[in-house]
Each structure stands twice: as structure tokens, then as C-alpha cells.
Image (cartoon, grey):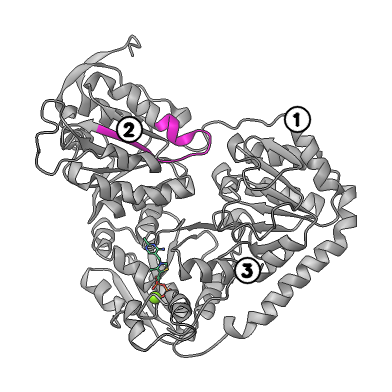
Amino acid sequence: MQIGHNRRMTGAQCLADMFKGYGVTHIFHVPAVLRTTFAEMERRTDIKRLHVHGEKAAAYMADGYARASGKPGICMAQVIGALNLAAGLRDAWLAHSPVIAMTGGREPKTKFRKVYQEIDDMPAFEPVTKFNATVDDVARFPDMVRQAFRVATTGTPGPVHLQFRGNEGQIDAEEADMEPLTESLFARVPAFRPAPDEASLRAALDMMSRAARPVIVAGGGVRASGAAAELVALAEALQIPVATSLNGKDSIPGNHPLSVGVVGTYSRESANRIVNAADLVCFIGTETGGMTTHFWAVPKIGAPAIQIDIDPQALGRNYPLAAAVNGDAKVALGRMAALADGATAQKRAPWVAEAQKFCADWRSKYQAALESDAVPIRPERLCHELTRHVPDDALVVVDTGHAGMWMGGMFDLRSPRQSYMRSAGHLGWAFPAGLGAKCACPERPVVVFTGDAGFWYHIAEIETAARWGINAVIVVNNNGGGNQSKRGFDRVYGGQQTAKARELWTFSKVNFARIAEDMDALGLRVEQAAAFPAALAQALAANRPAVIDVVTDIEALAPTAVA
Ligand SMILES: Cc1ncc(C[n+]2csc(CCOP(=O)(O)OP(=O)(O)O)c2C)c(N)n1
Ligand SMILES: [Mg+2]
């Protein structure tokens, strides 16, 4: 595309200038790809070029960076690492995170001739990207990079892949007449805030105002839109209890009187009970997927429902809707809060009281576990200590599996200034993603919660964190195995697994604190729950990355979802 201010430059100079123009601060990569561009970055920008230990970790770091900042996260790999990078994009895809992946690719002159390390990587990126494209001519750098940012940040955000010609993307050394124009509009999510059609919005609001027992289910779209304040304002104005998906957990603090917890499979019992007792479910910025709805049992399909989403294709996908609103969550909720008739709130007082009773019942059921002094430590107690002691402006980054269950159900945010991000399915995501989040928000405390199986995946990145001074705090719920699998193996063994079956899900007992120290991070080991707050405080103040190895009970199982 000719814009009129072209000048002769290399692709590398153009790309480096464009990264700078988009406000990119960090790039996560395994060498060697776009080498000339990296050299130009050093000459032309202050961008930090983080050389990490694996492409999947690079993708997770970029994802964590993106979810923490709203700015696209950039990760890179040469041709042989491309599928590792693609594997890492899956979580960004599932969580709608704007990650831009760049890889080396094939030369038309030599493809199909068995070039060392080369296969066709493009199909692997297809299911995990919104836009998956090749850059074959250096003159296309400007428009293709702009398109990458545009696609990543608009509509429902998501990952993008650009493959640059040459196994290591050597096309970047070629010259063309180009302008490194960037569009600040697409430098972060959300690029646009489409306002909903007023009639649809009023119809939805009318249903909420008339309902006697409504509940809101807020999802990751609320956090992507930055709509937490508007959500809480609407819920307060109309007195509607709020459940969240795991992705939406930070859209309302857990100590808010209308917060009822995370709903779905990795959930809190009170939230599932309230959603199933409601006479109207208001889905906002959620896919209404299997995890959030406990495979469409919470609520049951056919429950009266309304939905607000930026993606029109999400509206009604799983639940027939009485009202559908297409638009940005912040705009929609802000407008609804402004129009809301607070006089209707009074009639929902009994329902709010009932919802609060469900929450109180949950709390008394788990009080003993939340405050347990047991040794080895109960995970419930660990979550409770985090609720009490994670700083007011912390970013909490949580792995999946049991980590997702424990923290989704047992941990509460105390402040609207705290953030929560979670693996959308991949074990091992949280540690690298937490490092990426810390790169994006260096001034905020970042606390990662992971199991030991999750931590093992990318343990080498402790060295990256220490080398780059990425001072996140990693809390490892270390039970010496992947004990979420225990239940499933008991089941297939007909009730109780054999002793030998434990080889399917246990590891050697390892002290991660010692490993951390060997890599120049702070390592602390906690064997008594009462010692955790002091360890957390020491880790947060350490001025280097810290691993807190918490020795927990391998027999402890998180409660399963109620329907
Ligand atoms: C990439 C990937 N592979 C496998 C799984 C399945 N999985 C879920 S939880 C889990 C074990 C988790 O172990 P750990 O992190 O130690 O937590 P724990 O259950 O012991 O608390 C496994 C293997 C997954 N979620 N992601
Ligand atoms: Mg474990």
C-alpha cells in the first residue's frame, strides 16, 4: 500500500520502528528469527528482547503480558520452533487474548526440497488464530503488521500469526520503499467500543428490572472491556447478585455484598446454587461455554436468559435468549446503569438476602478448611491466606486443573484494584504468563498460584526471571503430584485405585525453593500454614523473583461442582 511518505528502508528497520510506534515494550522469543530486526531494535528502540527457554513459554509470556496490559503481546520463533509457539497460542485463543506470533517460514525457491527443519507450519496456526498469514514480499511489512494489530485488538480479541519468508525470517534484511506507519487505535484492547442498539438495550434492562430473582454471570469480556465499575454500578442500582466465570473473576471483588462467586465447573457452590435458583440469567461478556455453565447444567438450557456480547455470533449460542444486546460491555453496562430504575430494586431484597444466605452457608461449610492448621497444609488454607495477604493492587495469575478449582472457589479478591488471570485450560501456563504480566506491569505485585505439575513444565524460566529481574512471586501448591487426577483414577479402578496406580500421577518429592535459589531467585519453603504470611511478605519485598514452595496435602481434593 502506497501512503505517500515512503522511504527506502529494510524490513527490519520498518518492523523495529513499527513495534516502537505501537508501544511494544517486550518481545519474548527463542532465537533465531528476524535477527536483523532484533539488531535494529537495539539501535532504534528500548524494547526488551527476552531470550527464553522454550517457544511455548514465550507464547504464554506474551499472553500474560497481553491480558495484564490490554496491549498485544509479541512472541517469536524460527521455523523449527513454530509448532511449539502454536501450541502456546491455544490458551490465548481460548481466553481471547491479543497475542501476535511471528515465525520464520519457507522460501518459495526451496520449499518441498527437504530444507533442514522445515515443514509447512501454517495449518497448525489456523485453529488458534483469528488471522494467519504469510509475509512474502518485504514491501508488505507495513500493511501486514498493521493488519496483525488490527485483528488482534478488535471485536473479540485474539491471537494472530505472521510467517515471514525464510526459515529465520531473513526477508527482514531486504529493502523496499515503505512507511512504518502505526495506528495507535489498535495498540490496545478494546480498539473500538461499539454502542448497542438502544431498543435492544432497553429490552434487556426492562427484563432485568422486572425479574424478581435475576443473576448476572460476568465473563472475560467484562475484564477485556474494563467494565468492572459499570457492572458493579448496575448490579448495585438494581440489586442483582453477580456470579462470574473464571475469566471474569476480577469484575467484582469477592467481598462485595452482591458477589456470589465463580459459577460453573471450577466454581463455588453458592454461585451454582444461586444461578440455578434465578428466574433470569444475564450473561455479560461470556461465551456461555462448558466450564462456565458446568456443561450447560448451570443454568439449565431453557432458563430465561439475556446476553450482552461484543461478538454477535456469541448471542444465543447455548441458551435461547429473551433479549440479546450486541456491543461493548463498558458502554452497554454504563448506559444501563444510567437508565436503571432504582425503585425496582426493593422488590429484590428477599432474593438478595437468599443469595447472601447461600454465600454464608458456603462459608460456614468450608470455614474449618479455610482456617485449618493441618500439616501438610490444606490448599483451602493457602487460598485463604492469599485472600487475606495478597496486596491491594496485586495481579493474581492462576494455573488450571486443581489450581483453577482451588483458587476459583476458595480465593477472594478484596479490592477492585486487584486483578485475576487464569489459564484457560493449559497446565503450566501460569508461571510464564505471570512473568509476562510482571513485564507488562512492573510496578504491580504479581502473585502466581500453580501446582507442582504445573510448575515443572516451564521451571527453566526461573533463570529467565532472575536474569531479567522479573520479580514475580510464585506460590507452588506442592503436593508431589498431579492429584487432581486422583479422583479419575479411583473411578476407572472401580472406586479405589491400586497403590501402583499412583505412579500415573505422582512425582518425586522436590524442594522447589532450593531449585529457585540455585537459579538466583529467592526460594522459601513453607511447611506450616501460619508461616505463609511472613514468607509472602518476604517474597514481595525480595527485589528478585521468588518461589514459595508450600508443602500441601496430596490427599486434599477440591470440591466438585453442584448442579
Ligand atoms: C497441557 C495440559 N495437559 C494436561 C492437563 C490435564 N491436567 C489437569 S490438572 C493436571 C494435574 C495438575 O497437577 P498440579 O499442577 O500439581 O496440581 P494438583 O492437582 O496436584 O493440585 C493435569 C495433568 C492439562 N490441563 N493441560
Ligand atoms: Mg500437585
Asked if the beta carbon under badge 1 is closer than 8 A to the nearest atom of ligand 1, the reply is no
- Residue 404, given in percent of the width and then of the height, sits at 49, 66
Measure how far apart labels 1 and 3 are at the Cα level: 35 Å
Q: Answer left or right for 59 relative to 441.
A: left
Crowdedness near tag 1: few (<14), some (14–19) or many (≥20) residues, C-alpha within 10 Å: few
**Which disc number belongs to residue 198?**
1
Q: Is residue 23 above or below residue 82?
A: above
Residue 155 lies in the magenta stretch: yes
Q: Which residue is mark 2?
A: 20
Quadrant position of the N terminus in the picture: top left
Mark 3 residue type: Arg
What is the three-letter code of the residue carrying label 1?
Glu
Q: For marks 2 and 3, give the one nearer the viewer.
A: 3
Q: x, y percentage for residue 409?
A: 58, 69
Q: SS at mark 3?
A: loop
Q: Are marks 2 and 3 in contact (CB under 8 Å)?
A: no
Q: Position of residue 38 (x, y in %)?
A: 20, 38
Mark 2 or 3, nearer chain start: 2
Name the residue tied to disc 3: 268
- Report the magenta residues as a range: 149-163
Identity, as a three-letter code, of the amino acid under mark 2? Lys
Q: CA distance from mark 2 to mark 3?
A: 43 Å
Ligand 1 is in which quadrant of the figure?
bottom left
